[in-house]
Image (cartoon, rainbow, N blue to C red):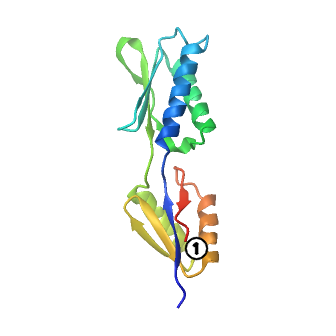
Amino acid sequence: MAKESSFDVVSTLDMQEVDNAFQQARKELSQRYDLKDSGSKLDLDKAAKKITVNAPGDFVAGQVIDIVNSKLVKRGIDLAAVKWSGAQDAAGGTVQRTGTLVEGIERDISGAINKDIKAQKFKVKVQIEGDHLRVSSPSRDTLQEVISFLKEQDYGQPLQYTNYR
């Protein structure tokens, strides 16, 4: 009997790259002529995985978010990994927006991935293991087809394919 091959479907973030992008965005915010005296603030909470933008208005908050997004893209972080909240009123007539960093695959998304793979009738086994999925099959070609299929789908967050053996 042939040995089974497998791979994991995960959603991870390199927090060091996120921190580097945050530091670059903060530096640009302090140096950019149109934003340096605007009173905008940018904070990163690594433990809670949140980026907070405080700005005097919604337009300025949008500009700061654009700066953060451009720095994240340059650092190789997929923008689907950041979910921005709507504008909320904060103290002093300012606006606050919070970006939540998405890491790990939630139960309902794992179920949707599992259902989509089974609907395609691939000859694979899918196991949901916490915040990732393990897909296994005796055929490596089938696993490659599953990876190609999943890359075409949009689940609202970036997916990586690791531990291919």
Give how far across and how far down residue 1 sits, in percent. 52, 91
Residue 98 is left or right of residue 2, and the answer is left
- The image quadrant where one finds the C terminus is bottom right
Other residues around mark 1 within 10 Å, as few (<14) / some (14–19) / many (≥20): few
What residue is rendered at 47% in x and 41% in y? Answer: 15
What residue is rendered at 45% in x and 45% in y? Answer: 102
Does residue 132 appear anywhere in the picture?
yes
Give how far across and how far down residue 74 sits, in percent. 63, 36
What residue is rendered at 55% in x and 82% in y? Answer: 138
Q: Is residue 60 above or below residue 65?
A: above
Give how far across and how far down residue 83 sits, in percent. 48, 39
Q: Is residue 161 above or below residue 67?
A: below
Residue receiving disc 1 = 120
Tally the numbered discs: 1
Q: Is residue 39 above or below residue 110?
A: above
Q: Secondary structure at mark 1?
A: loop
Instruction: Report the front residue among 112 and 29.
Output: 29
Give how far across and how far down residue 7 sits, in percent. 52, 68
Residue kind at label 1, given as amino acid type: Gln
Instruction: Report the front residue among 43 and 114.
Output: 43
- Residue 159: quadrant of the picture: bottom right
Q: Which residue is outermost to the top?
A: 37
Instruction: Report the front residue among 97 and 142.
Output: 142
Q: Which residue is outermost to the bottom?
A: 1
- Residue 44: quadrant of the picture: top left
Residue 151 is left or right of residue 23, and the answer is right
Does residue 59 appear anywhere in the picture?
no
